[in-house]
Image: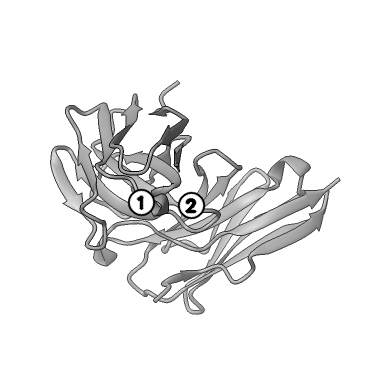
C-alpha cells in the first residue's frame, strides 16, 4: 500500500514558466513533508519542507503548499530553469507514523531551454 | 563543509563475493540510515542506527548487515551479493531530535554492480 504517491512520473516545462509537482498521501499521521531533488548518479538533495501546522513554505524560487484536508501537497518552482531538470521525490514522516521517511515514486522534471 | 560522504562511488563485485560500502559524516548526527534505490524508484529503507541502537526493517534480507563503530562511520555489508542486489545504495543522517521535523541528509550514493 503506497502511502505517498506522485501520480505524474514525468513533467515537461518551458524555461521561465512555472513547474508544479504534486504529491498525495493517505496516512493522516504524517505531519512533516519534504521534497528532495535527485540528479542521475547522485544522492537525493534536501530541497524544502513543510510542517503540518503550516499551509505554505517558501524558499527562493521554491514554494511548497500543503492541503491537509485533501492530503495533498505540491511543489512550485518559479521561474523554472534548465538546471532544475531532475527527479523530485516527495517524502512524509510523523512521530506517530514510525518517524521514518516514506517516499513517493518520484517525478522526472524536464525544463526545456 | 559538513557533509555525508560515501565511498566508493562505484563498486563492482562478483556474484556471491562479499562487499562493504562505507559512509561517513561530519554533521555529528545521531542517526544514520541505509537505503537501497533501484532505477528511479523510491529509496527503500534497509535499516538505521540511532547512536549504537540498530533498527532493522522487517523486510530487509539477512544478506544485508550493518556496522556502526563510532558516530562518524557506518558500513553496509552484503554477505553474498546476488544480481538483484545491483542498485544505488544511499546513506543518510539526521540529528535524531525525536521530532517529526528531523530532516534526513543524503550522501551521493554508491552504485553497486554485480557481475
Front-lying residue, B92 or A18? B92
Q: Quadrant of the C terminus of chain A?
A: top right
Residue corresponding to mark 1: B101
Q: Residues within 10 Å of mark 2 (few under 14, many from 20)?
A: many
Q: Position of residue B32 (x, y in %)?
A: 28, 40
Compared to B8, does A104 lie above or below?
Answer: below
Residue name at image x 78 percent, y 50 percent: A111
What is the number of the mark on residue B92? none
Q: Position of residue B27 (x, y in %)?
A: 34, 28
Tell which residue pokes out farthest to the right in this image. A113
Q: Are marks 1 and 2 in contact (CB under 8 Å)?
A: yes
Q: Chain of mark 2?
A: A
Q: Position of residue A74 (x, y in %)?
A: 59, 64
Front-lying residue, A49 or B84? B84
Residue name at image x 45 percent, y 42 percent: B115
Tell which residue pokes out farthest to the left in this image. B53
Residue name at image x 59 percent, y 72 percent: A7
Residue corresponding to mark 2: A49
SS at badge 2: strand
Residue A82 shown left or right of residue A46 in the figure: right
Q: Chain of mark 1?
A: B
Q: Residues within 10 Å of mark 1 (few under 14, many from 20)?
A: many
Residue A48 shown left or right of residue B59 in the figure: right
Residue name at image x 38 percent, y 46 percent: B103
Amino acid at each position: 500500500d503506497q502511502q505517498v504517491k506522485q501520480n505524474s512520473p514525468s513533467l515537461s516545462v518551458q524555461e521561465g514558466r512555472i513547474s508544479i509537482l504534486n504529491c498525495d498521501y493517505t496516512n493522516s499521521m504524517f505531519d512533516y513533508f519534504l521534497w528532495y531533488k535527485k540528479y542521475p548518479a547522485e544522492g537525493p538533495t534536501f530541497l524544502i519542507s513543510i510542517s503540518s501546522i503550516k499551509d505554505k513554505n517558501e524558499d527562493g524560487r521554491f514554494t511548497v503548499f500543503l492541503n491537509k484536508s485533501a492530503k495533498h501537497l505540491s511543489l512550485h518552482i518559479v521561474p523554472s530553469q534548465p538546471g532544475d531538470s531532475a527527479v523530485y521525490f516527495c517524502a512524509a514522516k510523523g512521530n506517530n507514523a514510525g518517524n521514518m521517511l516514506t517516499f513517493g515514486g518520484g517525478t522526472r522534471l524536464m525544463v526545456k531551454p | 563543509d559538513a557533509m555525508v560522504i560515501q565511498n566508493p562511488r562505484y563498486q563492482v563485485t562478483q556474484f556471491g563475493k562479499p562487499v562493504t560500502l562505507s559512509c561517513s559524516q561530519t554533521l555529528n548526527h545521531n542517526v544514520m540510515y541505509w537505503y537501497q534505490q533501484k532505477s528511479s524508484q523510491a529509496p527503500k529503507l534497509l535499516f538505521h542506527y540511532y547512536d549504537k541502537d540498530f533498527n532493522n526493517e522487517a523486510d530487509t534480507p539477512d544478506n544485508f548487515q550493518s556496522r556502526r563503530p563510532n558516530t562518524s562511520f557506518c558500513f553496509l555489508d552484503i554477505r553474498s551479493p546476488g544480481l538483484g542486489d545491483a542498485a544505488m545504495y544511499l546513506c543518510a543522517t539526521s540529528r535524531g531530535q525525536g521530532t517529526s521535523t528531523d530532516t534526513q541528509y543524503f550522501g551521493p550514493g554508491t552504485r553497486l554492480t554485480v557481475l
